[in-house]
Image (cartoon, rainbow, N blue to C red):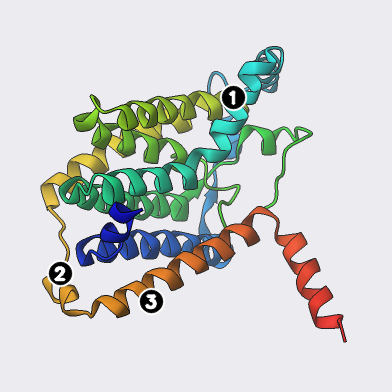
Amino acid sequence: MEWLRRRLSDPEILIRLNGFFLSYFGWMAFGILYGFLGRWSVDMTSAFLNLPFTSKAFVLEVIHFTKSIPPLYGLFTIVYYIGFTGSIGFMVVYLLVYLKDLDTSDKLLASYIFSYIFAGMTYMVFHIYAPHVVYHLSGYTSDNTLLTRQEFVLPSLHNTIITVNIILLWRHRHKLGAKFLIIVNALIPFATFFLGHHWIYDIISGFALGTFVCWLSGEVGMGIPRRLYDWELSSLRKITVLNFVLMLILLLIAINPAKIVEIMNGLISTP
C-alpha cells in the first residue's frame, strides 16, 4: 500500500524501528548471557512459597478451573503466546508505523529499555521459578529458550510490558485499533495467572514496574540523536531489512530450537 511505502521511506520511522529491534536483541542477548551471569543470583523460590496463594493445591485449582471452560482456556492460551513479543510488535506497528506518533513511540522505546534494565538487574540479584516449573506440571515446558528463561518470573516482564502498552495507548483510546490493543493487553495478566505461568505477585510487581518506567521515560525525556538522521535512506532501509530478517530467524529458532538444529544437520549431511 502507498501509505506503508511512504512510512517505510521515512527516516524518522526507520531509525526508531531499528531502535526497537536493537533493544529487543539486547534483551535476548541478556537471556543467553544469564546462563553464565545468573550463577550468582540467589534462588528465593523456597522462601517465596511461604506466601499465600503459592501452594500446589491452589495452583492446580486455578488451572483446573481454566481448563474446565474450553473457550476461556483457548482464549487465554492464544493471548499468552501473543503476549510478550506479539504485544511489542503490535504496539510498534500501530503507534510508530500506522499512527506515526513519534512522541509516544519514543516513550514506548524508553519504557521498554528501562523495563529490560530494571528486570535484568532484579534477576541478577535473586530469582524464583514459575508455578508450572516448581510443581513439575505436565504439558508445560521447563526449557530455557531465546525468548525467555524460567528464572525470569518476578517481576513479570509480560505484565510490565502490557502495563506500559496500556498506559501509552490510553491517549488513543477513542480509536478502534487502540481499543482492540488495550483489550488484548488487558487479557494478558489473566492469561499468565490462570494458565499457571506466573504467580499473582509476579503480576503485581510487573504492574508496579511498568507504571514506574512509564513515569521515568517521561521524566528522562529520551530522544533520538540528531546525527542518526545523517544516514542515507538506502542504508537505513538495508539495516531495517537485515534486522527484520534477523528477528524472524531468532523467533523461529526460539519457537522450536530442536527442529531448527535437526533441519541444519540435515542440510549439512545432504551431499
Any part of residue 236 in sight: yes
The kind of secondary structure element at disc 3 is helix
Between label 3 and label 2, give the one nearer the viewer. Answer: 3
Q: Quadrant of the C terminus?
A: bottom right
Which residue is drawn at the image coordinates 37% and 61% (left, top)? 23
Q: Earlier in the sequence, mark 3 or mark 2?
A: 2
Where is 40 relative to 136, above or below? below
Q: Which residue is mark 1?
A: 75
Q: Nearer the viewer, residue 101 or 120?
A: 101
Distance of label 3 from label 1 (alpha carbons): 38 Å
Instruction: Please provide percent x and percent y for residue 269.
Output: 86, 81
Q: Nearer the viewer, residue 40 or 89?
A: 89
Distance of label 2 from label 1 (alpha carbons): 41 Å
Splitting the image into 4 quarters, where does residue 32 fall? bottom right
Q: Residues within 10 Å of mark 1 (few under 14, many from 20)?
A: few
Q: Nearer the viewer, residue 219 or 268?
A: 268
Q: Earlier in the sequence, mark 3 or mark 1?
A: 1
Instruction: Please provide percent x and percent y for residue 166.
Output: 31, 32
Q: Which residue is mark 3?
A: 238
Distance of label 3 from label 2 (alpha carbons): 20 Å
Mark 2 and mark 1 in contact? Answer it, CB < 8 Å: no
Q: Is residue 162 left or right of residue 30?
A: left
Where is 71 relative to 246, above or below? above
Image mark for residue 225: 2
Instruction: Please provide percent x and percent y for residue 154.
Output: 47, 39
Which residue is drawn at the image coordinates 34% and 49% (left, top)? 92
Q: Nearer the viewer, residue 62 or 258?
A: 258
Q: Is residue 102 left or right of residue 36?
A: left
Any part of residue 58 in sight: no
Which residue is drawn at the image coordinates 72% and 38% (left, top)? 140
Q: Residues within 10 Å of mark 2 (few under 14, many from 20)?
A: few
